[in-house]
Amino acid sequence: AAGVIQSPRHLIKEKRETATLKCYPIPRHDTVYWYQQGPGQDPQFLISFYEKMQSDKGSIPDRFSAQQFSDYHSELNMSSLELGDSALYFCASSQGGTSVVTQYFGPGTRLTVL
Amino acid sequence: KNEVEQSPQNLTAQEGEFITINCSYSVGISALHWLQQHPGGGIVSLFMLSSGKKKHGRLIATINIQEKHSSLHITASHPRDSAVYICAVTNYGGSQGNLIFGKGTKLSVKP
């Protein structure tokens, strides 16, 4: 069965650079969530989209932005990267309409900021 | 105090042992999730519960809404069960999908 796809899987950037992470949800899933997991930390919710509209916002820095496109894939744009942005970024997808849904997680993108 | 607390933080078991991981939460929830994270990071959703009990293979998850407590049980544990098990909740009335995560229980099953 198709799973959530994230690209790239690994990314190395310098401080103050920009990065774009992509998430392709499971076919027919209309909801995408982004999470950030720092080294040794539990995941933190960043932002979610339902039917191409932002549905919830968590601890996402102002330097980050995200959107969901017409094909339901999502991109997380990160600017002015800082060392503390080094983390594993997970995307998850689900079929929306309720909060009681199973989220399916992607493999994550490991971002390293040097 | 964290909104989602797990115990134990670390657990070492011998192959074949019955394992229980506990999760307590302090917020109203619409659902509780048990997730598995392997070394290297990938997260797999094991269960989503809003009441009662669910079973999948050797895994059993239960939830007691009144006591705000859930348990994940692994029967006949195997070294391939070694992973971090994370409890996460969807806050009742919160916007869709905003999972609140526990800090995880690191399980190591020895052959």
Image: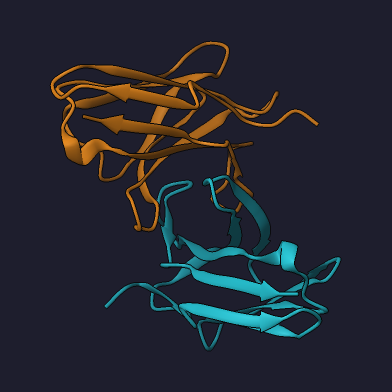
Chain colours: A orange, B cyan
Left/right of residue A53 with respect to residue A62 in the rendered view: right
Give percent across and percent down for residue A48.
42, 35
Return the residue nearer the eye: A60 or B92: A60
- On the rendered image, what quadrant is the N terminus of chain B found in? bottom left
Residue B9 higher or lower than B34, as above or below: below
Q: Could you say where residue B104 lies in the image, as x and y percent from the top left?
A: 47, 67
- Please give left or right for residue A99 compared with residue A16 in the image: right
Left or right position of B33 against B77: left
Above or below, B51 relative to A57:
below
Residue placed most toward the observer, A20 or B53: A20
Looking at the image, residue A98 sits to the left or right of residue A15; the answer is right
Residue depicted at 83% across the width and 71% down the height: B58
Q: Nearer the viewer, residue A58 or B20?
A: B20
* Residue at 23% from the left image edge and 17% from the top image edge: A18
Please tell me in which quadrant of the rendered image residue B64 appears: bottom right
- Where does the image place residue A67, in percent across and percent down from the top left? 38, 20
The residue sitting at 41% across, 34% down in the picture is A110
Q: Is residue B64 visible?
A: no
Residue A58, by quadrant, is top left
Is residue A73 visible in this depiction of the protein? Answer: yes
**Outermost residue toward the right?**
B57
Residue at (69% x, 75% y) in the render = B110
